[in-house]
Image: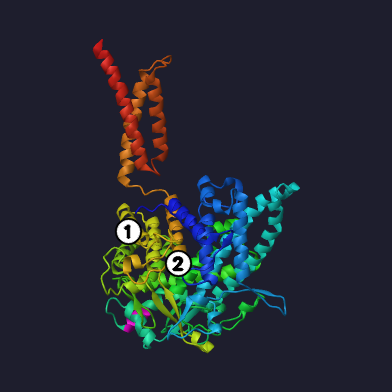
Amino acid sequence: MRIKPREQILGVWRSLLTACYQDETWVWGGRNGSNSISDAEQLLCLLYPATEIDGFGLETPDEIAKDILEVLSPFGDDGLRIGERVVWLLEQYVDRYTDHDPDTGIELPNFAAGSYLASSDGAEPTASQRALDVVDSYSMSLTLCLAAMKFLRGFSGPVAELAVGRRTRLAVELGPRIERLDAHINARLTAAMVGLVRSFVVNTVTPKSPAGQAMLSMLNQTGSSPGTVVRAVRDRLDRVRIRLRNDATLSQIEGVDLDSSDMLFECGWSWAIVRKAAAIDFVDMPIAEQPGYAIARPYLHFTVVALDGINDLTSQRTRELDLLDGQQRRLAEALQLRWDLAQRYWAAVARFGTGRWPLEDIPWRTSDGEESDYFSLIVSAVLMQDLLNREANDDDLDRAATIFDELARRGRIIRRFTAGDPARILHTPGLSLRLLGSEELDGPLLLWTVSDYATVLLKRTLQAARLSGTIETRDQLMALAQATMDHLDLRAFREGPATGLWDDPSRIFGGTESHLPSWYLTERVVECMVTAARMYREPPLRAPNSVTRAMELLTEAEHLLNREMLELSETDMSAGRTALALAEQRLERARKLIDERPGTAVSLASQALMELDELAYARFDATRSV
């Protein structure tokens, strides 16, 4: 199906309100219950497009588009009332996930993963385990807080104007509410940033260890000796190693050895704050020094989740709005450094060597020896994010397009699903990641389940299409993106209270049907629509021969236009003068578009040529009849 971001996002908004807003009450929770992550995902289905796509904004009541007003009409019949409902939702979220200490009166943000956590042995996780934060908690809260701050800072201006002279009671009441809410959101953002800083890890291993052997098995695609590969890796990643070693805050984890050149290393995010992670002394919050439990080894999934959240933090839109205070800017610098090093590391590892890329050797094998097509997809995601921020060449994107196509086939996105197909687990129930270290809280080893294979593929394919400078490659990527959207469309609910939301995998893969929405997947579909909208804002690709053809047509048309004007009297007010004026207008427009949109320029010049020919033929016909 064609990807139509505006239509599809408005469809999600309509379904969201139908499912969740009943009798002026908001229904929290979905298939996986209610927790700080799921409820943030639920809110982001509304707020992320509203703050990331021009034309979807809700912060200026008088400028909300008519179709958006109609979709959000259950919230109220005008923009001010709709904005108040958004404030109300954010107030509820903050209240649900802020702990109040009765002894000290201190309010602390709560990032508990709660019902998203499962155990490896079927036993119930303990209460202390349910209260654990994970990197998804921090990253999703970071994105939600930024979206909320963008909305609140924009909405406060119109509210203040309406409150002058007490023109509306609602505006007068909203001012103090927005101020209080902004302070809570600001504190939550700081805490989420601290959590992400302290969850970053560097892991060093010897080449002969099991982890080192697993890493070399991916890196050595040419059958070279282990020593040769280790030296090549050292040379390729030397700048990353030096920056990791020289920044004291990055290498304080016990056991990290970045001084030995014969050691292999990896960096990224573990599943939560790492054991013995360094405290952050300039932030006065418990999370800045609370103990961590996660092992000091990066997880690919949590690394990509962190990178995506930090990408929202460092985006041009966030910088332009100047949302961060001094303390947050200092944390943002620390996160920017980690973001840059992790992307450089994984992008280099994915394309290491002179022959076949390790990334092309599907499935990817992690340093703990586990392998999955999902890991290959996640490494591809890091590569795409890196290419978005650096200059991508056509060879990189052509090879990435082939990888995405292979992953779509292996994941049964563009191939038929068969009985007993092992690809089913990628989508339902999903791949389980062991949260090593969670068992230290006197409970079972916890699992984190990821089932976003299709949405990761769609989002990264759209990003690759946006970067591609080759028409054939972009066409191939867009065809794959549309096929992936077809797959996801089949998994949307067709009936019941969750109609129009996700996810009903039983429609493709069989199994037990669920009637509750998955905010985990629905939010990620919305992210894909935002990515598509950004791509459509970019100028279309232009073929070199199109520019040449447009110039040829323009040259001929302008010559014929000048000749027709020679034949036209200044006093002639006939239809011929009108036709010439129209042709001239088309050619001026074509001249302006020839570099950016040569195909459009060709079309305009062709229309002008047809009009000029009709004038010439009419004059010839009139002369012949005389």
Which dot marks residue 291?
A: none
Q: Is residue 182 above or below residue 558?
A: below
Q: Which residues are magenta?
A: 226-231
Q: Nearer the viewer, mark 1 or mark 2?
A: 2
| Quadrant the N terminus occupies | bottom left
Mark 1 and mark 2 in contact? Answer it, CB < 8 Å. Answer: no
Residue type, numbered disc 1: Ala
State the image quarter where residue 212 is shown: bottom left
Name which residue lies at 39% across and 43% down.
595
- Of label 1 and label 2, which has the lower sequence position? 1
The front one of 42 and 345 is 42
Q: Nearer the viewer, residue 451 or 34?
A: 34
Find the distance from the CA under tag 1 to the CA under tag 2: 25 Å
Residue 175 in sight in this render = yes
Q: Secondary structure at mark 2?
A: loop
Q: Is residue 110 above or below residue 147?
A: below
Query: Is 230 in the magenta?
Result: yes
Residue marked by disc 1: 483
Q: Position of residue 360 (x, y in %)?
A: 31, 70
Specify whether 451 is left or right of 61: left
- SS of the residue under disc 1: helix
Give the overall secondary structure of the magenta segment: helix
Residue 625 percent location from the top left of the image: 24, 12
Residue 428: where, in percent of width, then height?
37, 72
255 in the magenta segment: no
The answer to whether any part of residue 60 appears in the image is no
Q: Quadrant of the C terminus?
A: top left
Q: Kindly give the residue lying farthest to the left in the view shown.
A: 624
In the picture of the structure, the residue carrying the numbered disc 2 is: 516
Q: 473 or 440: nearer the eye? A: 440
Left or right: 131, with 158 as reference point: left
Which residue of the protein is positioned furthest toward the right in this rendering?
A: 165
